């Protein structure tokens, strides 16, 4: 059994699911300039960690947030989010999805 997960670098957009348990997911994302996710509501409580680059994120109707590397953004379940890389440097994220208990 392999207990080590390597984050693989990429020059292209990447969304890779590293761990998928019933109540917890761990996702590695890489976005180049002007890339991101479709606007959508969070399907879980999210903890979005910026590993490198700069995250541009809008939550619900709040003003755009600019989040630098080594920062964590907490996003509650149901929050509509617009996740983008609007900067020149590549953006790398590690996202924890904590699903609400039934």
Image: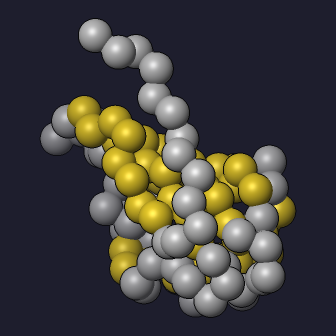
Give the side of residue 69 with respect to residue 49, left or right: right
Residue 38 image-quadrant placement: bottom left
Residue 29 versus residue 12 in the image, above or below: above
User: Residue at 28% across / 10% down in the picture?
Assistant: 1
Location of residue 67 with respect to 58 vertically, above or below: above
Residue 55 spot, x, y in % from top left: 70, 71
Q: Position of residue 61 (x, y in %)?
A: 58, 89
Q: In which image quadrant can residue 80 be found?
A: bottom left
Work out whether 17 lies above or below 21: below
Between 47 and 32, the one nearer to me in the picture: 32
Residue 10 located left or right of residue 56: left
Relative to 44, 34 lies left or right: right
Give the image location of residue 5, x and y in percent: 45, 29
Q: Is residue 88 left or right of residue 73?
A: right
- x 53%, y 46%: residue: 8
Q: Quadrant of the C terminus?
A: top left
Q: How many marks?
A: 0
Q: Judge whether 63 appears above or below 20 on screen.
A: below
Residue at 77% x, 64% y is: 53
Can the viewer see residue 74? no
Which sits in the foreground, 34 or 61? 34
Residue depicted at 31% across the width and 62% down the height: 43
- Nearest the camera: 101 or 42? 42
Q: How is the image coloured?
A: secondary structure
Q: Residue furthest front?
A: 11
In this rendering, does residue 33 appear at all? yes
Q: Position of residue 44 (x, y in %)?
A: 35, 54
Which residue extends farthest top? 1
């Amino acid at each position: 059994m392999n207990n080590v997960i390597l984050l693989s670098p990429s020059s292209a957009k990447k969304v890779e699911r590293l761990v998928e348990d019933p109540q917890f997911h761990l996702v590695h994302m890489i976005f180049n300039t002007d890339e991101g996710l479709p606007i959508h509501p969070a399907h879980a409580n999210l903890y979005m960690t910026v590993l490198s680059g700069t995250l541009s994120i809008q939550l619900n109707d709040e003003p755009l947030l600019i989040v630098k590397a080594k920062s964590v953004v907490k996003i509650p379940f149901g929050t509509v989010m617009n996740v983008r890389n609007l900067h020149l440097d590549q953006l790398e994220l590690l996202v924890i999805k904590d699903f609400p208990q039934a």
